[in-house]
Image (cartoon, rainbow, N blue to C red):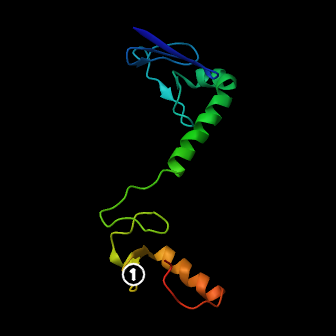
């Protein structure tokens, strides 16, 4: 079974689970292929093939690299068993020294939100009170 995916960067061909060089079409079984480190999208059998295919692949590579970078950058961290800060929605630290308990409402918030509230109160000459 032969599958191929056409992109503006060129043709990437797979046979079953076998990949092939985006430039010359050499199969992975015949030659160890190196992955484009920027986008992880295409594979090449040699540096010469990579250089030859670069003009065709450049735009798609930049777009895919930006997508991958955004996906990693904006990925929300996994929640912990302690829960999330109700203000910023980030996971509360496992160490209790990294969070503050509001004595008036018993809510637990992260130190960052507690600090931001203190700064807001000091800068605005406001009375100290719960951020809720």
The residue carrying pointer 1 sits among few (fewer than 14), some (14 to 19) or many (20 or more) residues within 10 Å by Cα, namely few
Q: Position of residue 65 (x, y in %)?
A: 59, 38
- Helix, strand or loop under label 1: loop
Q: Residue at x 55, y 84 (%)?
A: 118
Depth order, front residue of 18/46? 18
- Tell me if residue 88 comes above or below residue 119 in the rendering: above
In this view, the residue farthest toward the top is 1
In this view, the residue farthest toward the left is 81
Q: Quadrant of residue 47?
A: top right
Depth order, front residue of 92/53? 92
Depth order, front residue of 90/10? 90
- Tell me if residue 19 comes above or below residue 58 in the rendering: above
Q: Residue at x 66, y 26 (%)?
A: 54
Label tally: 1
Q: Position of residue 2 (x, y in %)?
A: 43, 9
- Tell me if residue 75 comes above or below residue 7 in the rendering: below
Q: Position of residue 6 (x, y in %)?
A: 57, 17
Q: Position of residue 31 (x, y in %)?
A: 44, 18
Q: Residue at x 57, y 46 (%)?
A: 70
Depth order, front residue of 68/25? 68
Q: Residue at x 43, y 74 (%)?
A: 109
Q: Which residue is mark 1?
A: 105
Q: Quadrant of the N terminus?
A: top left
């Amino acid at each position: 079974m032969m599958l191929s995916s056409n992109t503006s960067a060129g043709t990437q061909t797979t046979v079953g689970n076998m990949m092939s060089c985006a430039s010359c079409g050499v199969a992975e079984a015949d030659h160890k292929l190196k992955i484009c480190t920027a986008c992880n999208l295409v594979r090449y059998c040699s540096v010469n093939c990579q250089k030859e295919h670069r003009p065709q692949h450049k735009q798609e590579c930049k777009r895919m690299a930006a997508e991958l970078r955004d996906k990693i950058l904006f990925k929300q961290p996994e929640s912990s068993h302690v829960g999330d800060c109700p203000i910023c929605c980030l996971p509360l630290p496992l160490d209790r020294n990294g969070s503050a308990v509001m004595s008036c409402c018993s809510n637990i918030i992260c130190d960052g939100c507690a600090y931001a509230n203190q700064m807001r109160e000091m800068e605005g000459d406001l009375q100290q009170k719960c951020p809720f």
